[in-house]
Image: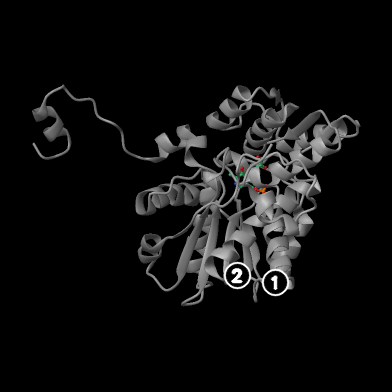
Amino acid sequence: MTGHGIIRRYREFLPVDNETQIVSLNEGNTPLIEASNLVSALGGGFHLFIKNEGLNPTASFKDRGMTLAVTKAAERGARIIVCASTGNTSASAAAYAARAGMTCVVLIPEGKIAYGKMAQALIHGAQTLEVRGNFDDSLELVRALGEREDIEIVNSINPFRLQGQKTAAFEVCDEIGNAPDMHFMPVGNAGNITSYWMGYKEYMDSGKSSSKPRMMGWQAEGASPIVLGEVVKSPETIATAIRIGNPASWEQALDAANESSGRIDCVSDDEILDAHRMLARTEGIFVEPASAAGIAGIFKSHSLGEIPEGSNVVVTVTGHGLKDPGVAIDNAKSKSKVVNPDLESVLSAIGLG
Ligand code: AN7
């Protein structure tokens, strides 16, 4: 199995060698897009680049970690991979398992994952279990299943996941020629912010970049245990991907924020929805609600005067908007119109009649 994904591109930074049989779907190498319209809408003053991770093979950033986790699971002879998920990890695991000829078992919170993600798990043939509980309950079950030798956990408690995900920071540095001044992203289980920080540190240590960004992580208000400093027993947010009350990488995320002079804060569901719609309207970039939390974070940070004039800011949008079409249709705040099949009706419907 070959491919041009992140393992090939960054093999010197990853725990692989020339013998490794890579399981890849050509993940990574996602676009970094300058978002001048959004900056103008905010009143200007800085450079904003959007790292569009929704353009990975299964339409989220999870593929970067999954290629390495599944490659290493196959290498040690595991036949079954298992994960708990709010949807994207399960979609990615299901696809990479299919590619590797492995069995995939996913545990998802009943009724709380977006439609597109459910479609992905099912069509790739994963054994899909809806748990009468939330993500945190599901992760506890997965930890117990992982005790078995024949089963490999592919949640971010598997260290290969974070190793793979750190390559997004390498790509950002390669593209803009150095690290940005600030990096914004949504935070759920807190693996991704941990990965980026690891990536930025490693790139600087190896002389590939000469600075590190302030890491700015954003939880949803109703699922903000890191901001509150305590576990949230019943997390709630429209952004189901980050509906997590007890993040696995909690301490590492706090370290990333503290070591980088950044911070972890939260935004409300209304702020998330405004950012979701505004990004789609001003830049033509359609993301899922969780990804819009990072964009909402930029609005909040900018309004607090935290983004210095002239600085380079990167925001990772983590998943594609088509993952969650239901929220998009509600949040568009406009409806389609039905017309008669004649020019007069069409012109009148678009206000030119
Ligand atoms: C679109 O799929 O936890 O802070 O089980 O799908 O690294 O957890 C997804 C998380 C942000 C948060 N954006 O990243 C899962 C899962 C999207 C996501 C996050 C997720 P982490």
| Residue at 46% over, 32% down | 326
Dividing the image into 4 quarters, which one contains the C terminus? top left
- In this rendering, position of residue 352 left or right of residue 275: left
Residue 45 at x, y = what percent?
42, 74
Report if the CB atoms under discs 2 and 1 are less than 8 Å apart. Answer: yes
Location of residue 319 with respect to 176 vertically, above or below? above
* Residue 36 circle label: none
Location of residue 227 with respect to 307 vertically, above or below? above
Q: Nearer the viewer, residue 325 or 49?
A: 49
As shown in the figure, which amino acid type bears the numbered disc 1? Met
Quarter-wise, where is residue 213 in the image? bottom right
Q: Earlier in the sequence, mark 2 or mark 1?
A: 2
> Secondary structure under badge 1?
helix
Look at mark 2 in the image and give the residue it sits on. Answer: 179
Residue 101 at x, y = what percent?
73, 27
Dividing the image into 4 quarters, which one contains the N terminus? top right
Q: Single out the residue that lies furthest toward the front.
A: 18
Can residue 89 be seen in this snapshot?
Answer: yes
Can residue 155 be seen in this snapshot?
Answer: no
Label 1: few (<14), some (14–19) or many (≥20) C-alpha neighbours in 10 Å: some
Look at mark 1 in the image and give the residue it sits on. Answer: 204
Residue 283 at x, y = what percent?
38, 53
- In this rendering, position of residue 119 left or right of residue 287: right
Label 2: few (<14), some (14–19) or many (≥20) C-alpha neighbours in 10 Å: many
Quarter-wise, where is residue 84 in the image? top right
Quarter of the rendered image showing ligand 1: top right
